[in-house]
Image: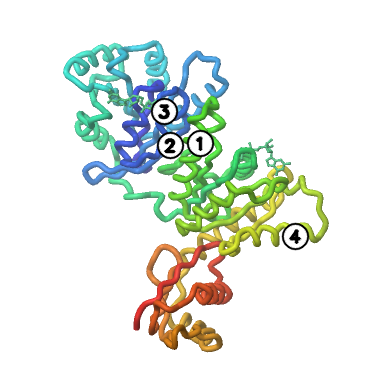
Amino acid sequence: MANIVAIVGRPNVGKSTFFNRLIEKKKAIMDNEPGVTRDRHYGYAEWIGKYFTVIDTGGYVVGSDDIFESAIREQVVEALEEASVILFMVDCGEGVTPWDRDFANVVRSVNKPVLLVANKADNTERIFAANEFYELGLGEHMFPISSNSGSGTGELLDEVVKHFEEDGDEDPGKDIPRIAILGRPNVGKSSFLNMLVGKDRTIVTNVAGTTRDAIDTRYTLFNKDFILTDTAGIRKKAKVKEDIEFFSVLRSIQALQDSDVSIVMIDATLGLEAQDMSIINLAHKYKKGIMIMVNKWDLVEKDEKTADKFTKAMIEKLGDMAYVPIIFTSVVTKKRIFQAIELAMEIHENRIKKVPTSKLNDIMLKEIEKFPPPSVKSKIINIKYITQLPTKTPSFAFFCSNPQYIKESYQRYLINKLRGHFGFTGSPITLFFRQK
Ligand code: GDP
Ligand code: GDP
């Protein structure tokens, strides 16, 4: 079992602040409104050479009429069961509240080491005030910390790592492709995810970093391991506010940046709209694998030419990004759902593919000979040698004379030839021209 630390506690005690401090990355979205940081988030952290997964469980609201309550409670219990150590967080500034007592009971029901963390112990007065939490009866150890300043966190982490049985992996998820599902509200993102969850029970659950929430879900399908990031959850679960809309856009961009492949989902009845184009542009700019999933295909009246017509119209809009593969799906009738995932994996494999230099030169130099770069101002451009760079995404260096005179149209020719011969399905290709 890998090392897993779960942070639990009622809303607003500072769980996500502490979580972010641990993973040093603003992954959880912060907001003072209870209920916004409800989804389980995970990240990787390190302390004195021990590596662990941190789960931020979000708050769960006891005794409210919140319809999400039972689902949230379930998630919290699930996180606790996965954990090696539980950090039960309370707020020194507020003292013991009924919610804390209720929560302490839940935590106690799970047979795991629990450390009581009294957060917001920003000054001496608060540190003394923390003593009242001993009444919760959660062991003799309490750790006053300040997530804002970081004070006390070292002592806490020293204790946390004592409970680990192993050193842990530096990043257990580093080789697993991350697929982000992006798209406007209502296109079917959550339905798609729910279908995948419902359909296949081989989902990895008891592995480090695995969560079953709407944000990051790790799957094993067709013997392939991948992590899906869904951006639908936040908007759905939070009470709709302008802020939430803003945060969900922010979160989409973040999910895109963190991903290897972006699935841009659109509604077949609406087509490719400006906002979709912005996402695709952004994915292209960040050199992510990209595909378009035209969902709700069941709602389109069609004959055998409809898909072609749709594709043509989209390719026209896509311009330089016409390489983006398009798949027509229906979550409702389960049409091409698994093919969509297979396509995403294919894109990932193409994105990390390396073409051997000899093969690259054999094939591409012939194409260049057939159609050499046009000379500019009587400057001859002579491409001598090509190599794929050891970068994360397909990039090629062309060594030539007068590289500054290579035209954009010629770059497009080279990219088309590279795609024609070697694939690179759904991946942006970057070219460099260097003096030789
Ligand atoms: P969560 O709902 O438990 O995840 O709580 P958040 O991390 O969203 O924090 C709730 C509020 O407490 C935010 O306004 C934080 O800035 C604040 N907060 C978090 N940690 C500290 C701390 O150590 N000291 C003080 N004074 N405020 C804190
Ligand atoms: P999200 O906001 O992108 O997560 O979208 P949802 O998954 O919540 O779906 C929005 C609505 O579209 C729901 O009523 C779904 O049942 C419906 N929906 C999702 N996929 C399809 C589909 O393939 N065909 C049809 N007809 N409806 C769909």
Q: Nearer the viewer, residue 182 or 316?
A: 316
- Can you say whether 416 is above or below 374 in the image? above
Q: Residues within 10 Å of mark 3 (few under 14, many from 20)?
A: some
Location of residue 235 in the rendering, given as x and y in whole percent from the top left corner? 54, 33
Identified at 18% across, 15% down, the residue is 125
Quadrant observed for ligand 1 in the rendered image: top left
**Between disc 2 and disc 3, whose residue precedes?**
3
Q: Nearer the viewer, residue 255 or 166?
A: 255
Identified at 60% across, 38% down, the residue is 185
Q: Nearer the viewer, mark 4 or mark 1?
A: 4
Residue contact at pointers 1 and 2, CB within 8 angstroms = yes
Tell me the element at label 2: strand
Q: Which residue is mark 1?
A: 213
Q: Which mark is residue 41?
A: 2
State the separation of the CA atoms marked 1 and 3. 19 Å
Residue contact at pointers 4 and 1, CB within 8 angstroms = no
Label 3 amino acid?
A: Asp
Tell me the element at label 3: loop
Q: Nearer the viewer, mark 4 or mark 2?
A: 4
Q: Which residue is mark 4?
A: 309
Q: Which residue is mark 3?
A: 31
- What color scheme is it? rainbow
Left or right, 7 with reference to 78: left
**Between disc 4 and disc 2, whose residue precedes?**
2
| Quadrant in the picture for the N terminus | top left
State the separation of the CA atoms marked 2 and 3. 15 Å
Residue lying at the far front of the rendered structure? 377
Q: Quadrant of residue 45?
A: top left
Q: Nearer the viewer, mark 1 or mark 3?
A: 3
State the separation of the CA atoms marked 1 and 2. 8 Å
